[in-house]
Image: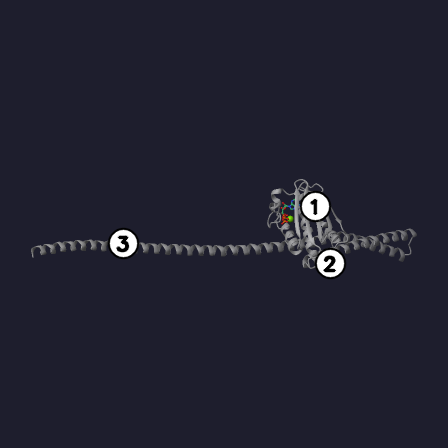
Amino acid sequence: MEPNSLDYEKQLKQLNKENRILTKKLQRSQERQIQLEENNQRKESLFKRVILDLEKSRDISEQQTMELSAALAKLKTTQEQLIKSEKMAALGNLVAGVAHEINTPVGNSVTAASTLAEETTSFANSVSTGKLKRSTLNNYLELATEASEIILSNLQRAGELIQSFKQVAVDRSSLERRTFPLKSYLSEILVTLEPQLKKTPHLITVTGDDTIQINSYPGAFAQIVTNLITNSITHAYPTNKPGYIRLEVHQKSEQIVIQYQDDGCGIEEQHLNNIFEPFFTTNRDQGGSGLGMHIVYNLVTQKLKGVIKVTSQVNLGTIFTVTLPLSDS
Ligand SMILES: Nc1ncnc2c1ncn2[C@@H]1O[C@H](COP(=O)(O)OP(=O)(O)OP(=O)(O)O)[C@@H](O)[C@H]1O
Ligand SMILES: [Mg+2]
């Protein structure tokens, strides 16, 4: 039995040893498990944080996008309001111009008519008192003829002015389409600008094909020409040298070309690409809003379905070329 009991003890030792090893292994694996779980928890909370952060930044960027689009919408409305008020101001100028321009012929007529009235009264007196001389009669006849001529020609002039102002003003406010002779309409627009032009030393001519009839929006033409001329007066001749401004119209296959040219100071190359941008102005100090050329660009490209190009050379002048389809309907 002796060796057997030894064997047994040996086996028992061995078993104990194995048991210890296994217990240790178990312990280690439990520790690893705990570590893994901890790791997992850490990772999970990290993920959660990342997701939360992402959501937060998405919320922020959504809010920023919303704020940006609100700001953009506001900017657009402001821009539209400015354009509208610009148009109203142009119409206001036109009305002030009409009043001023018509004042002269009407004033002349009133003077002539009141002189005629006075002379007629004293002539009637001479007749009724029987003191009428041949020379008095002749003088009166001469004065009456002259006064009637003055009254007639001035009232005719006033009538013409009212006619062209009426046409241009109605066209401007209604922006309706009709068929009209292009070249003479451009000249009519210049008549309405006479009050502003009279204060300047510049010469303006309209040349080219008299026969072009165009079915389009005359109001848009009035606004385009007014803005171009106002710009030349405001920007092109800073030294007040007398300028020569030319408007020329011709037809080129199915297109109409209107060339507007001034011989002023020109536009610096670095500004040429900006002049059609809204709010671009080199004249903010003097109250320029920078909308004039933007309005011109929109009218040409959207309302008239045409193209506008600008070329300019410093000290030589600026050319705007507007090309329009003869018919866009
Ligand atoms: N004929 C021209 N000669 C020289 N510069 C010009 C001419 N036309 C336009 N410009 C330049 O283009 C700019 C933009 O013109 P735009 O008509 O849009 O604005 P503005 O005339 O400055 O202001 P607003 O017309 O709103 O009163 C002007 O500030 C000016 O620098
Ligand atoms: Mg302008």
Residue placed at 15% from the left, 54% from the top? Answer: 14
Circle 1/circle 2 CB separation < 8 Å: no
Q: Which colour style is shown?
A: one colour
Question: What numbered label is drawn on residue 261?
Answer: 1
Residue placed at 20% from the left, 53% from the top? Answer: 21
Q: Position of residue 218 (x, y in %)?
A: 70, 56
User: Could you say whether the residue bearing mark 1 is in a helix, strand or loop?
Assistant: strand
Tell whether 280 sits left or right of 103. Answer: left
* Dot 3 or dot 1, earlier in sequence: 3
Quadrant in which residue 78 is drawn = bottom right
Residue under pointer 3:
32
Q: Nearer the viewer, mark 3 or mark 2?
A: 3
Report the front residue among 29 and 138: 29
User: Could you say whether the residue bearing mark 3 is in a helix, strand or loop?
Assistant: helix
* Dot 1 or dot 2, earlier in sequence: 2
Quadrant in which residue 125 is drawn = bottom right
CB at mark 1 closer than 8 A to ligand 1? no
Label 2, residues with CA under 10 Å away: few <14, some 14-19, many ≥20: few
Tell whether 196 sits left or right of 272. Answer: right
Q: CA distance from mark 3 to mark 1?
A: 87 Å
Tell whether 170 sits left or right of 282. Answer: right
Label 3, residues with CA under 10 Å away: few <14, some 14-19, many ≥20: few
Report the front residue among 111 and 158: 158
Report the front residue among 163 and 254: 254
| Amino acid of disc 2 | Thr
Q: Position of residue 285 (x, y in %)?
A: 60, 45
* Picture quarter with the N terminus: bottom left
Residue under pointer 2:
179
